[in-house]
């Protein structure tokens, strides 16, 4: 069966997250967005794991569903065309900070487990190394290779995906604290890495320029810190609805139908720059300025585009023989915000959002699938906006240095 999956999110136990990052609200918003499988986030946190055990129950092979009593608590106000049976996959993110070679490495990892018992065992194992109760995304002084070893020791069915691999400060290829190859990071266990999360600031064509990444499945997820941010990026599958089918699809690239992406220019670290001085720079401009901010003379933060350029062995537009499909979208709330000329979180936007979902179904179906002539009678501006997004005919000021 075909379904959409957002495999990397956070709970209300992570720093800077919404108090509504709870199973019932994640379930509610997954339905509004059109997501069939959503990550749980943060299962190493004891408080969150206890909440998951209270509110979820086993469903399909290795996946979980929200218990009926909690489904009822959020059913009111759900647009009827959006009602669906959402599944949860056990997932967490771990931050490892350690010294290797002549650098301090700061790498984030997304980890998946097939059942509550192994998730609990991993939490206990990692709790002996660092404090897993201080944050939903714990920080551990642990080598990335050794983290992967522990994950595989806990469960042979588990898998690890390097998170948002181009982010400057906390990722596998990050310009500030990462590596130049997967093998440098995971050493003799590198063969157990079969998928990479590209992150909001890069898209598949940027990653296709590095031939060493050809063998990996490139996945995209929202990394949501609030339920409304689900589906900023998602993955498309045509497999059985099970943990093992999802894992094997990523491992063998069978039944993986590609990704729906954020426009990477919107990412906070797409271009180089210095936020304090409001300086945004392309890689060429940075090189011309010898890596320095033209306003204050300090080093700029090297963004994703520049980092890709430095590792690329293919020209712009180059790609491997086999690639997975992708498309890029802008959220419906952002589109409505532009049309109505008010903020995306205002009551006017949210009211119109629910009106559209009540008529046409989940957000991703509206953005991707609904024929434009079905909108025409009531909203020509919406038709034009969706047409522009679908064709990529948009203008974006590139994000830089966290802006």
Image (cartoon, helix red, strand yellow):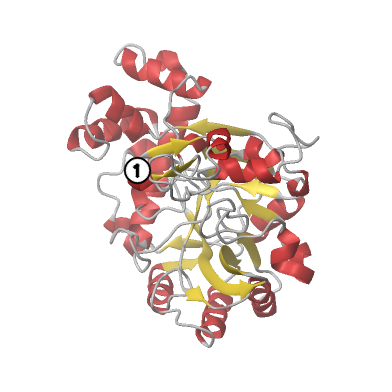
In which quadrant will I find the C terminus?
A: top left
Residue sitting at the far left: 347
In which quarter of the view is residue 366 placed? Answer: top left
**Residue with the most extreme bottom position:** 128
User: Dot 1: few (<14), some (14–19), or many (≥20) neighbours within 10 Å?
Assistant: few
Q: Position of residue 138 (x, y in %)?
A: 46, 73
Question: Can residue 192 be seen in the rendering of this structure?
Answer: no
Of 27 and 348, which appears nearest the observer?
348
- Please state which of residues 395 and 48 is positioned toward the viewer in this rendering: 395
Q: Which of the pair 287/376 is nearer the observer? A: 287
Residue at figure coordinates x 45%, y 82% from the top left: 131
Asked where in the image residue 380 lies, by quadrant, the reply is top left
Q: Measured from the top left, where is residue 233 in percent x and y?
A: 50, 43
Question: Which residue is the site of mark 1?
Answer: 277
Element marked by disc 1 = helix
Which residue does the image show at 76% across and 40% down from the upper left? Answer: 313
Query: Residue visible at 41% across and 48% down?
Result: 402
Say whether residue 290 is left or right of residue 349.
right
Is residue 51 found left or right of 62 in the rendered image? left
Locate the N terminus and report the quarter of the image it occupies: top right
| Looking at the image, residue 133 lies above or below residue 86 | below
* Total count of labels: 1
Query: Is residue 100 toward the left or the right of residue 191 in the image?
Result: left
How far across and how far down the image is residue 32, in percent? 38, 42
Task: Name the spot of residue 59 as percent of width and height, x first.
Answer: 53, 62
Regarding residue 53, the answer to whether it shows in the image is yes
The correct choice, above or below, for 192 with respect to 373 in the image is below
């Amino acid at each position: 069966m075909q379904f959409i999956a957002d495999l990397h999110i956070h709970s209300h136990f992570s720093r800077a997250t919404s108090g509504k990052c709870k199973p019932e609200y994640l379930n509610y918003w997954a339905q509004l967005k059109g997501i069939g499988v959503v990550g749980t986030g943060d299962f190493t946190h004891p408080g969150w794991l206890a909440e998951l055990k209270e509110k979820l129950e086993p469903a399909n092979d290795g996946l979980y569903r929200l218990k009926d009593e909690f489904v009822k608590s959020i059913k009111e106000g759900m647009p009827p065309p959006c009602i669906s049976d959402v599944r949860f996959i056990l997932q967490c993110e771990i931050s490892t900070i350690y010294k290797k070679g002549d650098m301090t490495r700061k790498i984030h990892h997304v980890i998946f487990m097939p059942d509550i018992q192994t998730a609990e065992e991993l939490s206990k194992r990692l709790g002996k190394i660092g404090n897993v109760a201080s944050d939903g995304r714990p920080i551990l002084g642990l080598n990335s290779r050794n983290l992967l070893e522990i994950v595989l020791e806990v469960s042979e069915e588990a898998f690890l995906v390097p998170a948002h691999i181009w982010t400057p400060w906390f990722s596998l290829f990050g310009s500030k604290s990462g590596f130049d190859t997967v093998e440098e990071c995971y050493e003799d266990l590198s063969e157990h890495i079969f998928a990479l999360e590209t992150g909001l600031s890069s898209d598949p064509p940027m990653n296709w320029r590095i031939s060493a990444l050809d063998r990996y499945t490139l996945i995209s997820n929202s990394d949501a810190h609030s339920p409304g941010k689900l589906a900023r990026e998602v993955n498309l599958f045509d497999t059985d609805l099970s943990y093992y089918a999802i894992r094997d699809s990523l491992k063998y690239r069978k039944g993986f139908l590609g990704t729906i992406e954020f426009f990477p220019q919107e990412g906070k670290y797409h271009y180089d720059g210095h936020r304090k001085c409001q300086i945004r720079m392309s890689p060429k401009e940075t090189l011309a300025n010898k890596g320095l901010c033209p306003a204050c003379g300090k080093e700029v933060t090297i963004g994703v585009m520049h980092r890709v350029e430095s590792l690329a062995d293919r020209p712009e537009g180059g790609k491997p023989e086999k690639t997975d499909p992708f498309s890029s979208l802008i959220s419906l709330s952002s589109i409505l915000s532009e049309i109505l000329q008010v903020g995306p979180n205002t009551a006017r936007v949210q009211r119109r959002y629910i009106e559209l979902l009540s008529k046409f179904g989940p957000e991703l179906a509206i953005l991707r699938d609904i024929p434009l002539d079905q909108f025409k009678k009531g909203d020509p501006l919406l038709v034009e906006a969706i047409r522009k997004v679908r064709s990529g005919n948009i203008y974006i000021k590139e994000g830089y240095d966290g802006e």
